[in-house]
Image (tube, helix red, strand yellow):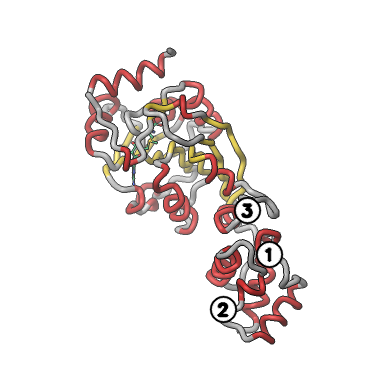
């Protein structure tokens, strides 16, 4: 057992902490993983780091060594008390007791120029949190997050692969994605039933494709993947164009309506969406 192993387990024991499964409480006990998360995020003295779900502060302590400031948002009041006692006197740390889904991140970010989100996310809310962080347009340079392996693979998937879908397109519209490392269940207490991956999402200055109607783009993507075996034509019949105009939109975009959604690149979805928008 190395120092970090002992520290996390010790704190759990010291405070007789009872894990709440429904809050996705699996704490890291493998020091190499916390190191790789901080290294993967490339945290520097310029950075405000926002952490979601600090737990007993395993990752937080490492982030505080590298960052200008750390703001940690935790929902569990028991953990907030533990964190206050253990690391609350660190001037660089601000603790927020709240649900990350209810936080206005602009209030935290303020005028800060270099903001990075780093977190071992609670898996039950990974997708809503990531969707919120991306869609609400906060000025994060990057998100380095540990999430369930399958979700990370969907975020990182290329067209044509089995895992490519609406989540891949949403994430890749806003970010470049890269895998930092895989993490086995043994790296946590208690052990989760799933494997994990640390993924980094680097936010692009401009979204990957230029769109005339962003909402329509995401509506088209959702309809195209609703039933994976359907052709684009079947998926998009209900998008709101009559048959002639839908055929025209496909012709104008140069896309065969017999193709399936999973074969289209983000650029092709962008083109199709702009051509459908012209005919509305
Ligand atoms: N960062 C710690 C670590 O790596 O050991 C703990 C990570 S644990 C996977 C997820 C943490 O998120 C828990 O501390 C849990 O209480 C907290 N959490 C769960 N739901 C939350 C929410 N909606 N908002 C903020 N924190 C949440």
Q: Residue at x 59, y 50 (%)?
A: 175
Ligand 1: quadrant of the figure: top left
**Residue density around tag 2, few if under 14, some if 14–19, many if 20 or more, within 10 Å:** few
Q: Which structural element holds mark 2?
A: loop
**Residue matched to label 3:** 164
- Quarter holding the N terminus is top left
Q: Residue at x 60, y 38 (%)?
A: 179
**Which mark lies nearer to you, 3 or 1?**
1
Q: Are marks 3 and 1 in contact (CB under 8 Å)?
A: no
Could you classify mark 1 by the number of other residues whose Cα lies within 10 Å: few (under 14), some (14-19), or many (20 or more)? many
Q: Quadrant of the C terminus?
A: bottom right
Residue 38 pos. (x, y %): 50, 30
Which residue is tagged 2?
238
Q: Earlier in the sequence, mark 2 or mark 1?
A: 2
Up/down of 239 relative to 230, above or below: below
Q: Residue at x 57, y 72 (%)?
A: 213
Residue 113 location (% of width, % of height): 48, 45
Foreground of the two, 260 or 142: 260
Q: Which residue is mark 1?
A: 260
- First in residue order: circle 3 vs circle 1: 3
Q: Secondary structure under badge 3?
A: loop
Is the residue 41 above or below the residue 214 in the image? above
| N-terminal label among 2 and 3 | 3
Q: Are circles 2 and 3 on residues that touch, CB within 8 Å?
A: no
Residue 34: image location, x then y, percent = 47, 27
């Amino acid at each position: 057992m190395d120092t970090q192993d002992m520290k996390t387990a010790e704190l759990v024991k010291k405070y007789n902490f009872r894990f709440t499964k429904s809050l996705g409480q699996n704490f890291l006990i493998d020091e190499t993983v916390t190191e790789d998360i901080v290294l993967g995020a490339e945290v520097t003295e310029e950075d405000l780091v926002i952490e979601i779900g600090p737990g007993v502060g395993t990752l937080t302590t490492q982030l505080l060594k590298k960052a200008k400031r750390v703001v940690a948002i935790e929902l569990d009041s028991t953990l907030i008390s533990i964190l206050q006692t253990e690391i609350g006197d660190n001037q660089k740390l601000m603790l927020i007791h709240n649900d990350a889904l209810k936080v206005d991140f602009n209030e935290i970010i303020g005028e800060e120029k270099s903001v990075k989100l780093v977190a071992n996310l609670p898996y039950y809310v990974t997708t809503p949190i990531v969707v919120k962080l991306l869609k609400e347009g906060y000025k994060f340079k990057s998100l380095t997050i540990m999430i369930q392996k399958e979700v990370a693979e969907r975020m990182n998937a290329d067209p044509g692969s089995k895992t490519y879908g609406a989540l891949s397109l949403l994430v890749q519209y806003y970010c470049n994605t890269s895998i930092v490392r895989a993490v086995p269940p043994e790296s946590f207490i208690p052990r989760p039933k799933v494997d994990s991956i640390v993924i980094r999402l680097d936010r692009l200055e401009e979204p990957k494709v230029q769109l005339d109607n962003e909402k329509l783009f995401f509506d088209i993507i959702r309809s195209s993947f609703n039933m994976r075996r359907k052709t684009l034509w079947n998926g998009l019949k209900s998008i709101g164009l009559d048959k002639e105009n839908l055929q025209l939109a496909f012709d104008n975009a140069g896309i065969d309506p017999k193709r399936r959604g999973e074969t289209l690149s983000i650029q092709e979805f962008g083109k199709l969406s702009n051509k459908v928008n012209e005919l509305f």
